[in-house]
Amino acid sequence: MSGDRKGMVAAVTGASRGIGRAVALHLAREGWSVALASRDAAALSDLAEEITAFGGTALPVPTDVTSEDSVAAMTDAVTARFGRFDALINNAGVGVFRTVAETATGEYDRMMNVNMKAVFLCCRSVIPVMSAQRRGDIVTIASLAGKNSFAGGAVYSASKWGIIGFSRSLMLEVRDRNIRVITLCPGSVNTGFADKERNDPTIIQPSDVAETVSFALSMPDRINVSEIDIRPSIRPR
C-alpha cells in the first residue's frame, strides 16, 4: 500500500510489548490508525495514550487471540470504529525452550494455540472484510526458528514452520482479491521474549522489525513481498 498512510487502519496483535508495541508505534507515527490487541488491557491503555499524545490514533481492544469469539469481537470493533481494515499484523507469540522430553503438554498446547491457532483465527476473521474491500495486507511475524532447527526448540520451531507454510498457502488463496500475505522471519530480537534482554548492539531490535513491516506495507499494490528473513549483519555475541 504505497502512498499516504493517513486514514489507513492496521490491527497489531501482541501489541502490549516487544515487537508488537514497536510496530504499533511506528505505524501510528506514519499516520496509520492502529488497533491494539492483547490480553493486557492496562498496557494497551498506556500505549494508546502514548500514541494519542503525539497526535496518532489508537484503539485499544483487549483480545485473547486464541479465542474465536474474542477475535471476532476485535474485528467487529475495528470495523465499527474505522469502517475498514487495511492491515493485520499477526505478532502475538510465545516460546518455551525445552527438550521434547522436558516439555509439558500444557506448554505444547500454549505454543501451538498462540503461535499457530491465533494466526488462523485472526486471518479467517479479517479476510471477509478485506475481500469486500478488494484490498488488504496480512503480515505475520514468524521466526528464523521456522527454518533453522535447534536443540531445545522442537515445539517452538514446529509452530513457526507451521505458520510459514500456512502463510504461503494463504497467499495463493487470496492474492486474486488483492490481499497480500507477508511473512517476516526475524532471528533473535532483543525483547525479553526468552526471559532476558541482551545488552548487545549487534542484536536485532524491535524497531528494526517495525521498520521492516513498514517497508513491506509500503510496496506498490502490484508487489507482494511475500517473505523476508531478518538477521543481524554481525553474529551476536
Image: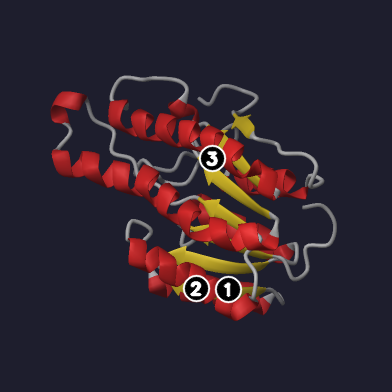
Q: Secondary structure at mark 1?
A: helix
Say how many tags the image has.
3
What's under tag 1, amino acid-wise? Answer: Thr
In the image, which disc is placed on residue 87?
none
Report crowding for label 2: few under 14, some 14 to 19, many 20 or more residues within 10 A (C-alpha): some
Determine the residue located farthest toward the right in the rendered image: 3
User: Which residue does the image show at 14% across and 25% down from the upper left?
Assistant: 101
Report crowding for label 3: few under 14, some 14 to 19, many 20 or more residues within 10 A (C-alpha): some
**Which residue is denoted by mark 3 in the rendering?**
170
Q: Relative to 203, is 97 on the left or the right?
A: left
Residue 228, by quadrant, is top right
Q: Are marks 1 and 2 in contact (CB under 8 Å)?
A: yes
Q: Position of residue 157 (x, y in %)?
A: 37, 29
> Is residue 154 shown above or below 117?
above
First-in-chain label (3 vs 2): 2
User: Which residue does the image show at 52% across and 67% down from the upper left?
Assistant: 36
**Which residue is denoted by mark 2 in the rendering?**
76
Q: Position of residue 150 (x, y in %)?
A: 36, 20
Q: Relative to 166, is 102 on the left or the right?
A: left
Q: Marks 3 and 2, Cα distance to the nearest angstrom?
A: 22 Å
What's under tag 3, amino acid-wise? Answer: Leu
Q: Marks 1 and 2, Cα distance to the nearest angstrom?
A: 5 Å
**Which residue is denoted by mark 1 in the rendering?**
79
> Is residue 23 shown above or below 102?
below
Q: Marks 3 and 1, Cα distance to the nearest angstrom?
A: 22 Å
First-in-chain label (3 vs 1): 1
Q: Position of residue 94 (x, y in %)?
A: 35, 45
